[in-house]
Image (tube, grey):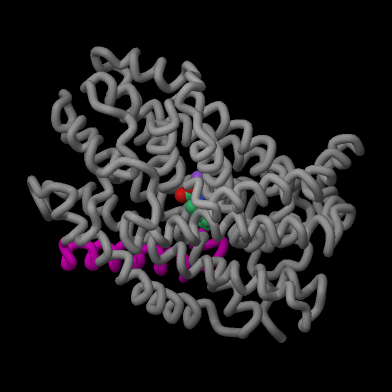
Amino acid sequence: DAPAREQWGSRLGFILAAAGSAIGLGNIWRFPYLAGEGGGGAFVLVYLFCILGIGMPYLFAELSLGRNSQRNPVGAIEAIVGKRSAWLIVGGFCVLAGFIILSYYSVIAGWAVGYAVKDIIAPGMGFEAFVASPTLVITLLAAFLGVTLLVVLGGVEQGIERWSKILLPVLLVLILLVIFRSVTLEGAGEGISFYLMPDFSGLTTEIIIAALGQAFFTLSLGMGAMITYGSYLSKKENIATSGIYVVVFNTVIALMAGFMIFPAIFAMGVDPATGPALVFVVLPEVFSQMPLGGLVGVTFFILLSIAALTSSISLLEVVVSYFVDERSWSRKKSVLIIGGITFLMAIPSALSQGAVPSLSAGGIFGPETGFLGFMDYYVGSLGLALGAFFLSIFIGWVWGADEAAQEMMQGSNMSAQVLSVWMFVIRYIIPLVVLVIIIGYITGTL
Ligand code: PHE
Ligand code: NA
C-alpha cells in the first residue's frame, strides 16, 4: 500500500503556507518598482482591482481543482479528463514553469541574501559589479536553493507548514521596523502622498497590463502552485475563506512594501521610477544616507530573503509533488534530483547580468535585461498568463464551473448568488481578460 498522501496539519498552517507562497519577491521587489514606474497611487488602485476582480476568484478555482483530486497539477487534470487527454500538456507546463521560475527566482533571492551580508562579503561593491561576479552569484544561488531544498525535504506539514508559521511572523515584524524608520524620516510625507494619491496621467496600457500580470505572479497563480497547495487541503476546509485570508495577507504585505520604500525614497530626493533596480540600487543608497541606515538595510534584505524563501519552497513543491504522485519517487529523491537540475538551469540566469546594459536603466524587467529578464518576461509574466488562460478554460468549461463550484462549496457556505457570479467570472471574465494580457504581451506593448 502507498502511504497516505500528506495534508496540512491545521487550517492556520495552510493559510500561512499559501500566504507564504504568495508573499515573496513579487510583493517587495516587483510591486514597488512597478508602482514607482506607474505613477504610484494610480498603479496601486488598478492593481487592487486586478487582485480582487481577477486574482481572487481565480485563486479559488485553482485551490478547488487541487483539492478535488488531491493530486499535483498533472494528476489533477488527469483525474478529470483521463490519461490520454491533450489537456495533460497544460499540467506538464505547470511543472516545467515551476522548474524555470524557481531557477531565476533563486538567483534574485541569492542577491537579496548577499545584500543582507554585503558589508561582510563584498563591502563597498556596487550592484553592477556584484551581480557580475560569478563566484558571488553562484555561491549565493547555491546557498538559497540549498535552504529551499532543506525545507521541502521536511515535507508538507513538518517542512513547509512549520517554516511558514515561523518565518511569516518574523517577516511581518521586520517590515514594521523598516516602515517605522522610513515614515519617520524628514520629508517622508511626499512619498506617502505619491503612493496614495492616484495621478492617472502616468497610466499607460503597458502599466495596466503589468498590473494584471502582477496579480497572477503575486498570488502564485497560473502555474499550479495553488493547485498543489490546494491538493493538501482536507474536504472540510473552507476554500473561499482561506483564500480570502491569503489574498488579504498578500495585499497587505505588498502595500506595506510601498510604505517601507516610497517615504525613504522621497525623503532622500530620489526618483521612484528606476525599474527593477529600485530595491537593489536605489534603496541601499537611500539607506546609506539615513540615520540607522546600515541596520535598516540589513533588516530589509533579511526580510526580502525570508519572503523569497517561503515562495521558492512552493515552486519546488509543485515539481516535487508531480514526481511523488505520478512517478512514485520518494520525496527525498525528488527534492535532491530536482534541486540539482534547478541549480544547473539557474546558472545561465545567474551569469547573465554581467554583460547587460544594466538593470538600472529603468523600464520594466524584460528581455533586454539579459537572460534573467528574458525568463521573468516569457515565463514569469507571459507564461503565467498563458497558464491561467488554459487553466481557467479547463476549470470553467472542461471540468465545468458548476462542478468546480460544488468542490468549492464543500466545507463552505456561500450564497447561491455569490456562487453564480463566481461561475460567470471563471467562465467568461477571466479567460477574456487574460487573453487581452496575452495579446498585450505578444504585440510587444510591454
Ligand atoms: N507569488 C510569489 C511572489 O510574489 C512568486 C510565485 C509565483 C511563487 C508563482 C510561486 C508561483 O514572489
Ligand atoms: Na506575492
Compared across the picture, whether 226 is left or right of 106 comes to: right
Left or right side of 199 for 269: left
Extreme residue in the front direction: 443
x, y percent for residue 5: 67, 72
Question: Which residue appears at 23% of the width and 62% of the height?
Answer: 137
Residue 251 is covered by the magenta coloring: no
Residue 56: percent from left, percent from top: 67, 42
Where residue 105 sits, quadrant-wise, is bottom left
Pick whichever, 21 or 130, lies toward us. Answer: 130
Looking at the picture, does residue 5 appear above or below residue 22?
below
Q: What residue range appears in magenta? A: 133-160
Looking at the image, residue 244 sits to the left or right of residue 440; the answer is: right
Q: Is residue 269 above or below residue 134?
A: above
Q: For the N terminus, which image quadrant?
A: bottom right
User: In this image, 210 relative to 167: left or right?
Assistant: right
Q: Residue at x 88, y 41 (%)?
A: 420
